[in-house]
């Protein structure tokens, strides 16, 4: 082709028409091959570029996903640890609440027991003040009025008669409820501590509580 362009063949007498066609066809084929080769090269470069871009994108996405997965895992572990700590705190609070409830229940029982004991003492004091001591004075007055000798009857004898005359059966309890509320309440307490007793005299604990100090007073009067 270079020789043809330089008119080298004219110096030799020139080329025939068929030879010119052959040369032109060869040149055209060569140019076509060069264009196809350049096109293939461009396509190859473009394909490699696209593949590299895709690979880079996939690699970046994979790295980003790995980072996100690591963050999510760390966050999940942190949440799990926080949940465990919250659960432990909740269990601790529940135990503390149970202890507080138990202590409150115990304090309530102590308070109720103290209140019951205070009420019991108040009933005893009221009985001794308003009834038993008055009874001693009545017995003493009776002794003086009738000139009963001391050796024949004592205040203690009178009190013992009253103690054993305090009947604890159900029919008497119902009668106390109607006629003597104080005696009714005391009778319920006596029956609580001495369920098998029929009279107050058979319940040493309560006969002592109710008449112990009175018997001492009786001895002093005599």
Image (cartoon, rainbow, N blue to C red):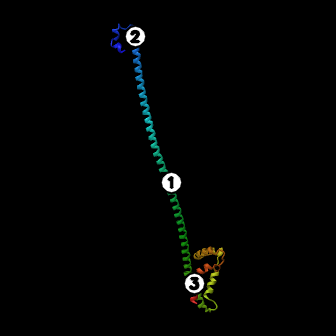
Rounded to the nearest angstrom, the CA distance separating label 1 from label 2 is 91 Å
The percent position of residue 139, horizontal first and vertical second, equals: 59, 87
Horizontal relation, residue 17 to residue 154: left or right? left
Residue drawn at x 33%, y 9% is 11
Quadrant housing residue 50:
top left
**Residue under numbered circle 3:** 214
Kindly state the secondary structure of the residue where label 3 is placed: helix
The percent position of residue 28, horizontal first and vertical second, equals: 40, 15
Residue drawn at x 57%, y 84% is 214
**Viewer-proximal residue among 12 and 52:** 12
The percent position of residue 109, horizontal first and vertical second, equals: 55, 69
**Residue under numbered circle 2:** 21
Can see residue 137?
no
Kindly state the secondary structure of the residue where label 1 is placed: helix
Can see residue 62?
yes
Q: Are marks 1 and 2 in contact (CB under 8 Å)?
A: no
Q: Earlier in the sequence, mark 1 or mark 2?
A: 2
Rounded to the nearest angstrom, the CA distance separating label 3 from label 2 is 159 Å
């Amino acid at each position: 082709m270079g020789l043809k362009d330089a008119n080298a063949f004219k110096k030799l007498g020139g080329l025939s028409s068929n030879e010119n066609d052959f040369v032109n066809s060869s040149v055209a084929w060569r140019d076509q091959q060069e264009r196809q080769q350049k096109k293939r090269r461009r396509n190859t470069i473009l394909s490699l570029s696209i593949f590299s871009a895709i690979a880079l994108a996939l690699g970046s996405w994979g790295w980003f996903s790995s980072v996100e997965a690591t963050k999510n895992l760390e966050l999940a572990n942190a949440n799990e640890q926080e949940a465990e700590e919250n659960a432990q705190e909740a269990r601790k609070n529940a135990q503390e609440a149970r202890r507080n409830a138990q202590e409150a229940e115990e304090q309530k029982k102590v308070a109720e027991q103290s209140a019951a004991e205070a009420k019991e003492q108040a009933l005893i004091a009221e009985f001794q003040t308003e009834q038993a001591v008055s009874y001693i004075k009545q017995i003493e007055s009776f002794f003086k009025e009738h000139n009963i000798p001391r050796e024949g009857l004592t205040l203690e004898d009178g009190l013992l008669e009253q103690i054993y005359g305090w009947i604890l059966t159900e029919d008497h309890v119902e009668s106390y409820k109607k006629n003597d509320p104080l005696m009714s309440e005391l009778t319920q307490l006596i029956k609580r501590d001495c369920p098998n007793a029929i009279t107050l005299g058979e319940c040493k604990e309560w006969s002592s509580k109710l008449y112990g100090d009175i018997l001492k007073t009786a001895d002093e009067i005599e």
